Structure formats: C-alpha cells, structure tokens
Amino acid sequence: MVIDFGGGVLGALQRYADPNAVNVLLSHLHADHCLDLPGLFVWRRYHPIPATERGIMYGPANTWARLGAASSPEGGEIDDFTDIFDVRNWVDGEAIELGTLNITPRLVCHPTESYGMRFTDPSGATLVYSGDTGYCDALVDLARGADVFLCEASWTDDPSRPPRLHLSGAEAGRAAAAAGVGELLLTHIPPWTSREDVISEAKAEFDGPVHAVVCGEVFDITR
Ligand SMILES: [Zn+2]
Ligand SMILES: [Zn+2]
C-alpha cells in the first residue's frame, strides 16, 4: 500500500516493494502527491512478469480523469488505466477495508478535494496521515487518540501565510495536542523552510515525541 505517489516515489518504491503488487491511496491530486503514477502505469502494463490482478486505487472524485489525462501523450485524451487499476473514490467519513486495515478518509481543508486518512489494524494500532491541510476540526477529529500522527507542516508560524492551505509546525503540534496522539511525525517540510524551526514550534505545542521524517525511515506502530 502506497499513500500518495509524487515525484521520485516510483524509484524509491523499488527498494521496498514490487510496483506490480501495490495498492495506491491518494490524499488529493496536486502534482506533488500523484505525478509519478503515469510511470507506474507503464511499469504495470509492460513488465514482462505482469501483475496477477489489478491494483486498487482510492482517491478524490477526479482521480480517473486527471491521472488518465496525465498519462495520455495527446491533448484532450484520457488514457483509461482501469485495465491495471480498479479506481475508487473516497467518500468523506466512510471507512473501507483493505487487507487487514480499516481506513477512514476525512475531507480536510485544502484548495482541492483532499483527504486525511486513519489506518487501524486488528490490534487497534492506529496511524493517521493528515494529507495536505490547513488547521481544521476534521483533522483533529480524524487524529483523535492515534498512536502515530503523520502530519504535514509546510511552514513556520508566520502570520502572513495564506489561510486554509497548509499547517505550520505550531499548528501541527496544536492538532497533535488537541487530538491526544501518542507521537507526532512531521512531513511535507519543503527545502526552503527551516526543519529546526518547524520541529521546535511543534514541540512548544505538543508534549509527546516529535520527529521530522526523512526518506527511508521505518517506524513500528503498536499499542
Ligand atoms: Zn496539496
Ligand atoms: Zn503537497
């Protein structure tokens, strides 16, 4: 299962899993969250050892049309990739089962249809991923009591930031504290934002463990 599929993911994925065997969950359709998928479509169609079954892909309402357009070399045409993926749309608050996981999507606050996701395994261990979002009640509700909260923090807490778009480190920490999570993992920090400032903002708001993730790290989620 791969959560979001932005630039560079197809290359990195090959170190961890067979690209022919993954399901894909998309928070939203901004390019940094989905545009390595046309490369995955080529992989799945032309690999000499084909996948034994279609992958499952969940995303917002426009997932098939937007990714089909991105995968087509001709303007105005859509590459219908339903031969390799069973494309399904999230319904806000409606849980799905995938493998042994229960996954609940929640619409969060971003300029395009965008979902956070709550993953619960049979033991009750819970991971919540914020997707891209501004601060909102839906995010705090979704993260409530999670063992691990993987949360975006795109900015430091500068009042000139545009509203309803992304979180600062302070807001990520505030959401983690309000939701009572066990651990806060920060992601989506761009190279032009100070990681150290984002981390210290979050730590000032949240008493639990705070860590900014880097590529290749592995985490156990248990309770
Ligand atoms: Zn976005
Ligand atoms: Zn993003």
Image (cartoon, rainbow, N blue to C red):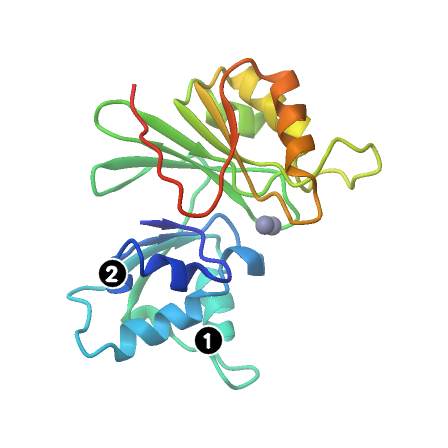
The crowding category of the residue bearing disc 2, from other C-alpha atoms within 10 Å (few below 14, some 14 to 19, many at least 20), is few
Please tell me whether residue 162 is drawn above or below residue 26 in the rendered image: above
Image location (x, y in percent) of residue 84: 28, 69
Q: Quadrant of residue 82?
A: bottom left
Report the residue that reaches farthest toward the right: 160
Residue that extends furthest to the bottom in the rendered view of this protein: 74
> Image height check: is 123 above or below 61?
above
Left or right position of 93 against 191: left
Which residue is the site of mark 1?
A: 71
Query: Residue 187 at x, y = what percent?
Result: 54, 40
Please tell me which residue lies in front, 32 or 106.
Answer: 32
State the separation of the CA atoms marked 2 and 1: 21 Å
Q: Position of residue 128 (x, y in %)?
A: 43, 32
* Residue 54 against residue 165 in the figure, above or below: below
Front residue (pair 56, 174): 174
| Three-letter amino acid code of the residue under disc 1 | Ser
Measuring 49% from the left and 43% from the top, which residue is drawn there? 214
Q: Which mark is residue 18?
A: 2
Badge 2 amino acid: Asp
For residue 215, the mark is none
Which residue is rendered at x = 55% and y = 29% of the image?
Answer: 138
Relative to 195, is 102 on the left or the right? left
Structural crowding at the residue carrying mark 1, measured as other residues with C-alpha within 10 Å and reported as few (<14), some (14–19) or many (≥20): many
| Looking at the image, residue 215 lies above or below residue 10 | above
Give the image location of residue 143, x and y in percent. 47, 25
Check the image and name the residue furthest to the front. 196
Give the SS element for disc 2.
loop
Left or right of residue 174: residue 77: left
In what quadrant of the picture does the C terminus appear?
Answer: top left
What residue appears at the point 58 percent right and 57 percent down from the top-left corner? 30
Q: Which type of secondary structure does the marked residue at label 1 adopt?
A: helix
Instruction: Name the image quarter holding residue 218.
Output: top left
